[in-house]
Image: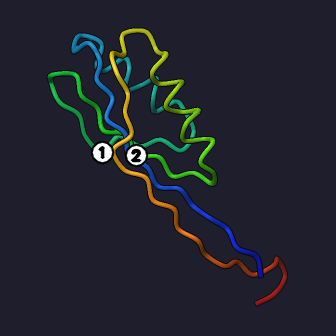
């Protein structure tokens, strides 16, 4: 058996409100992203489910560097560990 981990994170992204839909599409084009909610004021909730912490910080940087994004900040980060069976064993 091997031990794997899953990182579950949520972010709040604040964007210029007139670019809300455009930024949401750009975020959803990134792997492992979900958007469970947003507001007219330009706030977007983003959930990430990834295999490592590096991906979380890379994604925050990518989102923060999108044009018309004002801020991106991490509000929640949890690491789950679970055992996996090697392929071929039941």
What is the x, y in percent for residue 48? 47, 46
Indicate left or right for 34 with 49 as reference.
left
Indicate left or right for 23 with 63 as reference.
left
Query: Disc 1 marks which residue?
Result: 36
The figure's colour scheme reads rainbow
Mark 2, Cα crowd under 10 Å, few <14 / some 14-19 / many 20+, is many
Query: Disc 2 marks which residue?
Result: 47
User: Can you say which quadrant of the picture contains the N terminus?
Assistant: bottom right
- What residue is at 45 percent from the left and 29 percent from the top? 27
Q: Are marks 1 and 2 in contact (CB under 8 Å)?
A: yes
Q: Secondary structure at mark 2?
A: strand
Compute the Cα span from label 1 to label 2: 7 Å
- What residue is at 38 percent from the left and 20 percent from the top? 23
What is the x, y in percent for residue 51? 63, 54
What is the x, y in percent for residue 47? 40, 46
User: Can you say which quadrant of the picture contains the C terminus?
Assistant: bottom right
Q: Quadrant of residue 78?
A: bottom left
């Amino acid at each position: 058996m091997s031990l794997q981990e899953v990182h579950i994170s949520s972010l709040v992204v604040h964007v210029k409100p007139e670019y809300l839909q455009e930024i949401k599409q750009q975020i959803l084009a990134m792997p492992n992203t979900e958007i469970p909610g947003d507001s007219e004021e330009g706030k977007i909730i983003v959930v990430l489910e990834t295999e490592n912490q590096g991906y979380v910080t890379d994604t925050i940087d990518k989102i923060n560097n999108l044009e018309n994004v004002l801020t991106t900040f991490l509000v929640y980060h949890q690491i789950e560990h679970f055992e996996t069976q090697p392929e071929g064993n039941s």
